[in-house]
Image (cartoon, helix red, strand yellow):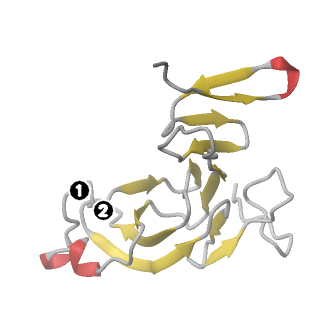
Amino acid sequence: MGGASSSISGSGGSSVSGIAGSTISGGSGDIKITSGVNRPNDSVAIVTTSKATVANASGANLRAYYSTKEMQLSEIVGAKNVFKPESPELPYLILHAIGVVSFNPGEGLFATVLVEGTSTPSICAGIIAENFQVRPGSSVIITASRKIVQQKSDQDNEWVDEDGNNHKTA
């Protein structure tokens, strides 16, 4: 008895064959094949996820902790405001001052954004957002005044917000 396979065809005659659970990456996002069963009457569920960016215009190095569930600040920061070590349950992204990071929020995430100490990066020097909800495909800018605003969706410049303000500094 032979095993079933799935195939996805794209424009230009390209195709990808594989099994359920595969992720296919592309320029505008990933396609995840989520069905685990290959019987004749079953369909394969395809979920598209978009890449997102966060542009840091705050002037400080930041840590963005993320999770699919809400986090407690006590899980991230310990005594004397020292950051706890990274764990698989609470990974984080380093957001360099005046930098842009791309990530895949999947089906949505919660993010807690904290300021690293200037002379001691292992110390939390402030909170920008706690459990900020990141929607799929939603790109944001952390402004110089340390607020989070939505990036303009039809803009190639990740520093421009929905009101047309450019937050990149020289």
> Mark 2 near mark 1, Cβ–Cβ under 8 Å?
yes
| Residue at disc 2, secondary structure | loop
The percent position of residue 88, horizontal first and vertical second, equals: 26, 54
The percent position of residue 152, horizontal first and vertical second, equals: 80, 65
- Left or right side of 56 for 62: left
* Outermost residue to the left: 79
Task: State whether residue 63 is above or below residue 149.
Answer: above
Residue designated by label 1: 87
Three-letter amino acid code at the position of disc 1: Ser
Residue 90: image tag: 2
Q: Residue at coordinates 86% horizontally, 58% vertically from top-left?
A: 154
Three-letter amino acid code at the position of disc 2: Leu
Q: Residue at coordinates 46% horizontally, 70% vertically from top-left?
A: 111
- Left or right side of 110 for 100: right
- Left or right side of 116 for 145: right
- Front one among 46 and 149: 46
Neighbour tally class for label 1: few under 14, some 14-19, many 20 plus, Cα within 10 Å: few
| Residue at disc 1, secondary structure | loop
- Front one among 43 and 128: 43
Q: Quadrant of residue 85?
A: bottom left
